[in-house]
């Protein structure tokens, strides 16, 4: 919402700016006022450090970035003010929609009403600037507007590649509106059980997998979706790993099996160079999935460690894998994952005792949500990637009748999975996907 003012036993809503009397009737309504230029917004203010507390006291002439990732914040305004005093607040982490701010006018009027009214703001990305206008109207908002989330990081196109039956070396490009193209065949060693991720901000890489044995080969993907020939020999040969982007322009392959499950990871530089093994963080497992979140971090989750698991491991923006976080969502393997919305992620589908269609959203703080069930054909051994900068796509897989399929399901920029789109490209399973630009 923009801003709501109402009786203290009221309210938080969205989509309007209003003042409610104690009888619940709307007294006034007003739209947001947007400053004409940058200097008008910030001129003369002294910006303070990021505020993370649940309460704070504001001082005239200062600006405050308010981080409500962990909690809402109640802001107490000065108990006295002079005409022209200004204060500004900004949604530091774009979380006011979840944990908003409450303004305590501390004995002074706010938009002409006394402080028996509750003033709350709860829109992600909101900027609020208030000016004291004198005793009658008191504090008046002159800027009350959400700032667009730009630039949204992400790539506009995607690619599905390799898989079974075969194995295959074919690929299928995904357009910036989520349309899957027909097969492109023949680049790189045919294989399955591989992984893929973005690197360099606009390119991709397929890595590892299984031919008649585990391999450690990789294939770079250009920023126009062209798959390069094999690069062999970096890191432990294995199959069933996962991969994702981190740090904005680098990638990481993690976990898998050599016949026994491993917790090995291999970083990918922003030039697409795969590093040697880093061993030993988190539960060893295979056929897990991974995706980005929070613009520059990543998460590995789910998989088969000898039993099905929902364990997850966060990856910092420097590529450091954290210890296990356990137990959110149904344990499964053979699922896919991708980023959406510019800073969030989604895990979807997979295998328990059969293929499933459940999904789990990942917040921009890396928190995995409980299961959402029931969209699209239940299946496993699926792949997923980002497209259109802020959306995603799940594709292909193995249905509950144990048939390979070429079904895809688009993911909106708010994490909603669409119904099946069927029939483009060779039906297959145990493939991989990544985005490029």
Image (cartoon, helix red, strand yellow):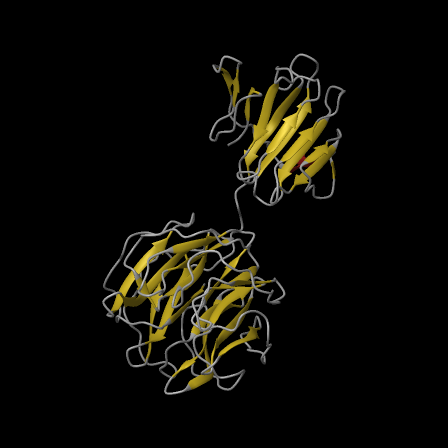
Instruction: Please give the name of the residue rendered at 64% of the width and 27% of the height, measured from the top-left corner.
Output: 103
Residue 131 as seen in the image, left or right of residue 12: right
The vertical placement of 309 against 132, above or below, is below
Percent from the top left, x then y, of residue 291?
48, 62
Residue 423 as seen in the image, left or right of residue 62: left
Is residue 390 visible in the rendered image? The answer is no
Percent from the top left, x then y, of residue 317?
61, 62
Percent from the top left, x then y, of residue 259?
45, 83
Instruction: Please give the name of the residue rendered at 26% of the width and 67% of the height, measured from the top-left corner.
Output: 405
Q: Residue furthest front?
A: 307
Residue 148 as seen in the image, left or right of residue 77: left
Name the image quarter holding residue 180.
Answer: bottom left
Name the image quarter holding residue 281.
Answer: bottom right
The vertical placement of 430 against 414, above or below, is below
The vertical placement of 253 against 106, above or below, is below
- Count of number-bearing discs: 0
Name the image quarter holding residue 114.
Answer: top right
Q: Quadrant of the C terminus?
A: bottom left
**In the image shown, does 345 or 112 lie closer to the viewer?**
345
**In the image shown, does 313 or 142 lie closer to the viewer?**
313
Percent from the top left, x then y, of residue 251?
54, 69
Instruction: Please give the name of the residue rendered at 52% of the width and 65% of the height, measured from the top-left corner.
Output: 245
Is residue 228 visible in the rendered image? The answer is yes
**In the image shown, does 250 or 13 lie closer to the viewer?**
13
**In the image shown, does 367 or 370 lie closer to the viewer?**
370
């Amino acid at each position: 919402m923009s801003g709501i003012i109402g009786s203290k036993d009221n309210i938080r809503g969205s989509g309007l700016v209003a003042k409610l009397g104690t009888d619940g009737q709307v007294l006034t309504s007003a739209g947001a006022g947007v400053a004409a230029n940058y200097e008008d917004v910030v001129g003369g203010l002294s910006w303070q450090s990021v505020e993370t507390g649940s309460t704070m006291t504001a001082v005239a002439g200062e600006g405050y970035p308010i981080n409500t990732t962990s909690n809402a914040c109640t802001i107490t305004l000065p108990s006295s003010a002079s005409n022209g005093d200004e204060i500004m607040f900004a949604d530091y982490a774009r979380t006011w929609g979840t944990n908003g701010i409450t303004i305590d006018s501390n004995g002074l009027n706010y938009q002409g009403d006394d402080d028996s009214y509750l003033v709350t703001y709860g829109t992600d990305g909101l900027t609020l600037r208030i000016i004291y206008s004198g005793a009658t109207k008191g504090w008046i908002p002159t800027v009350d507007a959400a700032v667009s989330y730009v630039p949204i990081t992400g790539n506009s196109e995607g690619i599905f590649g390799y898989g079974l039956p075969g194995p295959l070396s074919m690929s299928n490009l995904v357009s910036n509106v989520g349309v899957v193209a027909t097969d492109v065949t023949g680049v790189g060693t045919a294989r399955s059980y591989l992984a893929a991720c973005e690197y360099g901000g606009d390119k991709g890489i397929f890595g590892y997998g299984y031919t008649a044995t585990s391999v450690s080969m990789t294939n770079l993907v250009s920023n126009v979706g062209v798959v390069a020939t094999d690069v062999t020999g970096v890191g432990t040969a294995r199959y069933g790993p996962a991969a994702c982007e981190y740090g904005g322009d680098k990638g990481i392959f993690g976990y898998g099996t050599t016949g026994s499950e491993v917790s090995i990871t291999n970083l990918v530089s922003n030039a697409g160079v795969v590093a040697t093994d880093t061993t030993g963080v988190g539960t060893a497992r295979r056929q897990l999935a991974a995706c980005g979140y929070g613009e520059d971090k990543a998460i590995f989750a789910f998989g088969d460690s000898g039993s099905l698991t929902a364990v997850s491991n966060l990856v910092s923006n420097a590529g450091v894998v954290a210890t296990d976080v356990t137990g959110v969502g149904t344990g499964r393997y053979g699922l896919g994952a991708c980023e959406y919305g510019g800073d969030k992620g989604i895990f979807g589908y997979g295998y328990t005792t059969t293929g499933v269609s459940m999904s789990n959203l990942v917040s921009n703080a890396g928190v995995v949500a409980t299961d959402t069930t029931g969209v699209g054909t239940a299946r496993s051994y699926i792949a997923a990637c980002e497209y259109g900068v802020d959306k995603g796509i799940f594709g292909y897989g193995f249905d509950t009748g144990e048939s390979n399929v070429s079904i895809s399901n688009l993911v909106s920029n708010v994490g909603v999975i669409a119904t099946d789109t069927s029939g483009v490209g060779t039906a297959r399973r145990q493939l991989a996907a990544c985005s490029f630009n």
